[in-house]
Amino acid sequence: MYEGTEAEIYDLVNEGRGKDYAGESRLVIDLIRTHRPDAASLLDVACGTGLHLGHFRTEFDRVAGLELSADMLDIARRRLPDVPFHLGDMRDFDLGDAKFDAVTCMFSSIGHMADVSELRAAMTCLARHTVPGGVAVIEPWWFPEAYHPGVAADVARTERRSVARVSHSSWHEGNTRMEVHYLVADADGGAHHFVETSIVSLFTRREYETAFDEASWTPTYVAGGPTGRGLFVGIRR
């Protein structure tokens, strides 16, 4: 997931879809400052190409990123060469003795945990890298009662590349099946099409809160958030 061409076009597609990284980052920073005004360090888990981190690093003295996709990390490292990035899985990563005042996980990446045991493992791993009293800001996927299958279509362009993204989401064994078709046209390489399919878990609010609690977090749910799916704010006990 998010390798090769998909990693290359990731920023262009999200720019075309109107994603507001600056506004999202400000919201997250304000939530962190509300609960820990003196926070000086932050780890962004599932950091992608580093666009949130580009804003976080202006606010915190020490930032780092963790990402499962090597190709996404390559882009992030080129964008932010002074920021340490780590290749790893949020369920079992180990940064040694490194601990942070805040951890973040945006863009509903937590929804890619396959079941509640993986969700709990991820929250435990985040807790292990957070100081007592530290803050986690996690953007969930939809709760089951709020999810509605549907379609979306977007087009993004630069001078030498055009990308059309068409998606279809549907119920699949109680979760979301997301099928995304990309048509990419490059001035030098011609046009090609590829498909990315993923399953995103529809955890209940209670399942999220239980995973937080069992991993030594005290959670609060904040409705709305950057995409309407809300945000969980956890305080490390």
Image (tube, grey):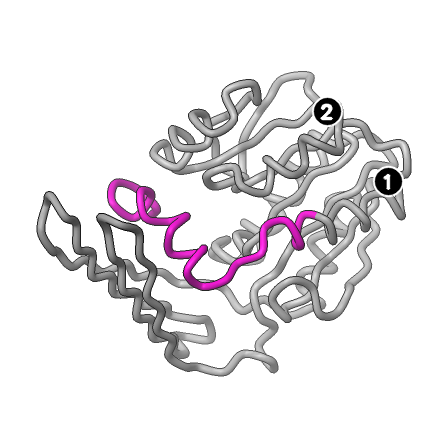
| Residue 164 pos. (x, y %) | 27, 64
Magenta region: 1-25
* Chief SS of the magenta region: helix
Which label sits on residue 18?
A: none
Secondary structure beneath dot 2 equals: loop
At a point 63% along the width and 49% down the height, the residue shown is: 22
Residue ID for mark 2 = 99
Return the residue found at the far front.
159
At a point 78% along the width and 64% down the height, the residue shown is: 222
- Which one is earlier in the sequence, the residue at label 1 or at label 2? 2
Residue ID for mark 1 = 237
In the depicted structure, whether residue 101 falls above or below residue 202 = above
| Residue 140 pos. (x, y %) | 61, 60
Secondary structure beneath dot 1 equals: loop
In the depicted structure, whether residue 207 falls above or below residue 107 = below
At a point 65% along the width and 54% down the height, the residue shown is: 24
